[in-house]
Image (cartoon, rainbow, N blue to C red):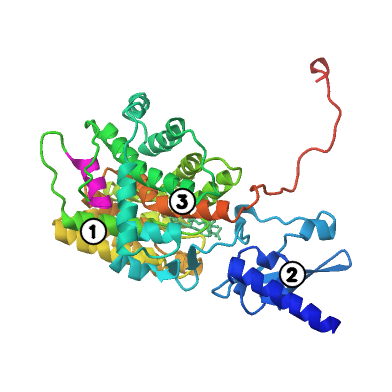
Amino acid sequence: MAFQVLNYTIRLLKLNILLKYGTSYPKIYENQWLCSIFANKNPKCNMADKATLEFEGKKYEFPVITGSEGEKAIDIKTLRSATGGLTTIDPGYKNTGSCTSAVTFLNGEEGVLRYRGYSIEELADKADFLEVAYLLIFGELPTEAELNKFHSDIKTKSHVDEDIKKILDGFPKSAHPMGVLSSLTSALIAFNPASVNADSKEDMYNAIVNIMGKFPVLVAWALRKRTGQPLDYGDDSLGYVDNILKMMFKRPNSEYKIDPVVSNALDKLLILHADHEQNCSTSTVRMVGSSHAGLFASLSAGISALWGPLHGGANQAVLEMLEAIKEDGGDTKKYMAKAKDKNDPFRLMGFGHRVYKNFDPRAKIIKVAADDVLEKLGVEDPILEIAKGLEKEALNDPYFVDRKLYPNVDFYSGIIYRAMGIPVEMFTVMFALGRLPGWIAQWKEMRENKEPIGRPRQVYTGEKHRAFKEVSNR
Ligand code: CMC
């Protein structure tokens, strides 16, 4: 009888939790007892696997969680408390997962990239950037009505306060547009001071359409400042990407006609950059947001992280490298030798990736697009030939083959940007424009999952305790 009551109670509890959270509530697996109930409903709850750690003669067991694509991770949340203070060390987080995430799946060995389950190849071919942004942020492809509403809400929020122009005026014309963009994004906080209530769907939605509307204006203004053009406010009758092009390139004394080749190419590039799971800038956005700093502040930090030449800044660095090789007579072998020389700091920019160890699926799409765009625009760029030559040599060179170094997304993207008439200093800004929905989606997920503040541990290697010496005794 007692057993029947217990059984009945467990069933009721199970039903209650199922009704409340469905089968994918991200925190359920934290409770091992609940997890055992859900073992075959929720992939994250597969508790069959355990990892055993042996340290100083004692054995400790840790659960292994399994993602929806079968990837496994040892859950070490209780490591310190169970072992009395043992920690882990993993510079660059090469083996460390900082969160569970349902946004983007990436398999570097197989060259697979999917947003919310949809392959990057299919999205680049069939979707437009705004649809992809909606998909990343809200989890599903929008219906036509949802997409129209999203676009119309973005348009109503695209006005940037006139006083932001005064801040822009303060920058010298020579300022790098990534610095300008990061500063202006941060400055938006002053003009939108109310903090976002992450528990309110409405508040979250408003913050999202607000930044989706204002960010392209800031991007376009960063370019116009550099090129000495008057600032433009865009045109609400245009599509999201066409409007960006117009804001960037419309000359004050002439009409701007959208070239569908340029518009389609930009749309595709933005989709390919839209998210890439826990990379340096996205982790920065999540980390800054984990202190409950606002969305704009978190994005501004993400822009700064993206700027570096090892991350998004690589697209500018690739073009500068290809130019330098051209100026130097086009001797690709010389630069291959430099890249392999451990005493030379030179690296083949646009090659290698932390996670892709076979090929970068984005680079494959971009290489084909580069050929197509240049041909359609009638542009002959000698740099494309140098890039292809370098790629061919690298793919047949044991140094690159052994280290699994392949062209990444940034290797060919700059060539397309240049054909579109975008100056080289703006390349990383274009990357940021594409990455915006990914950053938003990841920030939103982090807040909705109520993730704890990001605060890694360290292993201290400095001086042990020592007594202070007065300045006269030093
Ligand atoms: N040229 C020459 N050697 C390289 C390169 C390169 N581009 N990339 C890596 N290596 C070598 C590196 O020297 C090391 O050799 P060894 O084992 O003999 O010491 C080995 O390959 C492993 O490299 P790593 O630096 O330990 O790998 P990582 O995962 O820490 O770095 C990376 C990844 C992307 C920062 C690096 O490959 C790199 O600096 N590439 C050039 C910059 C670039 O194109 N960045 C854009 C990345 S894609 C856009 C994005 O999403 O950020």
Q: Give the quarter of the image for residue 95.
A: bottom right
Q: Judge by depth and name the residue closer to the eye, 109 or 28.
A: 28
Badge 3 crowding class, 10 Å Cα cut-off, few under 14, some 14 to 19, many 20 or more, is many
State the residue at coordinates (11%, 34%).
253
Instruction: Name the residue tied to disc 2.
Output: 32
Magenta span covers which residues? 239-250
The percent coordinates of residue 81 (x first, y second) are 81, 57
The percent coordinates of residue 433 (x first, y second) are 36, 48
Instruction: Name the residue tied to disc 3.
Output: 440
* In the image, residue 44 above or below residue 309: below
The percent coordinates of residue 6 (x first, y second) are 80, 78
Q: Most prominent secondary structure in the magenta stretch?
A: helix
Q: CA distance from mark 3 to mark 1?
A: 23 Å
Q: Judge by depth and name the residue closer to the eye, 249 or 128.
A: 128
Work out whether mark 3 precedes mark 1 in sequence or the reverse, and give the earlier one: 1
The percent coordinates of residue 199 (x first, y second) are 56, 49
Badge 1 crowding class, 10 Å Cα cut-off, few under 14, some 14 to 19, many 20 or more, is some
Left or right: residue 375 versus residue 75 is: left
Work out whether mark 2 precedes mark 3 in sequence or the reverse, and give the earlier one: 2
Q: Amino acid at mark 3?
A: Ile
Q: Amino acid at mark 2?
A: Gln
Instruction: Name the residue tied to disc 1.
Output: 264
Q: Secondary structure at mark 2?
A: helix
Q: Is residue 353 visible?
A: yes
